[in-house]
Amino acid sequence: MKSKIIALSKNEEFKTLLKKRKISNKYVTIFFGHLNNKDIKKLNISFVTKKKLGNAVKRNKIKRRLRNIMNDAIKKISIKLNYSYLVIAKSTMLNNEFNNIKKILFQEFRKIR
């Protein structure tokens, strides 16, 4: 089952998710919770990289990595689609290997179940 990833679009969605539960590790901080008027069949997730992390090339690299990890996560582990997620990247993502980041993020999403 391939689920389409949909980004959060409204400012209100970001604000409500920031007030919900969170999990943090050395690579990312994940905010998650239920949002009203959300399609349950699709993954509602947004990736945020701050300007402190570097120029646009570095920030986009981080977002590409996170999108790729989430596409794998949908296939390999069961992610709760009734939650909405906000993933805020930290600066340690740039200097570490993709497989290390992937392994730790998979562990975090298993905890959310």
Image (cartoon, rainbow, N blue to C red):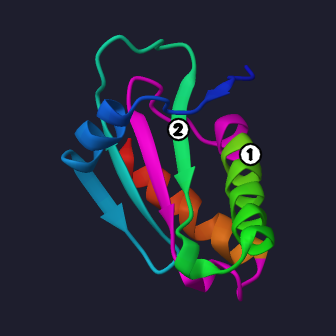
Measured along the vertical axis of the image, is residue 36 above or below residue 59?
above
Circle 2 packing at 10 Å, graded few (<14), some (14-19), many (20+), is: many
Left or right, residue 23 beside residue 49: left
Image marks 1 and 2: residues in contact by CB distance under 8 Å: no
Q: Tag on residue 45? A: 2
Q: Amino acid at mark 2?
A: Ile
Q: Is residue 17 magenta?
A: no
Viewport quadrant of the N terminus: top right
Q: Is residue 64 above or below residue 91?
A: above
Q: Which residue is mark 1?
A: 72
* Segment tinted magenta in the rendering: 72-97
Residue 85 percent location from the top left of the image: 43, 42
Q: Position of residue 55 (x, y in %)?
A: 72, 76
Q: Who is closer to the viewer here, 79 or 67?
A: 67
Front residue (pair 97, 93): 93
Quadrant in which the C terminus appears:
top left
Residue type, numbered disc 1: Asp
Badge nearest the viewer, 1 or 2: 2
Tell me where residue 70 appears, x and y as whole percent. Answer: 66, 46
Label 1 or label 2, whichever comes before in sequence order: 2
Indicate whether residue 84 is drawn in magenta: yes
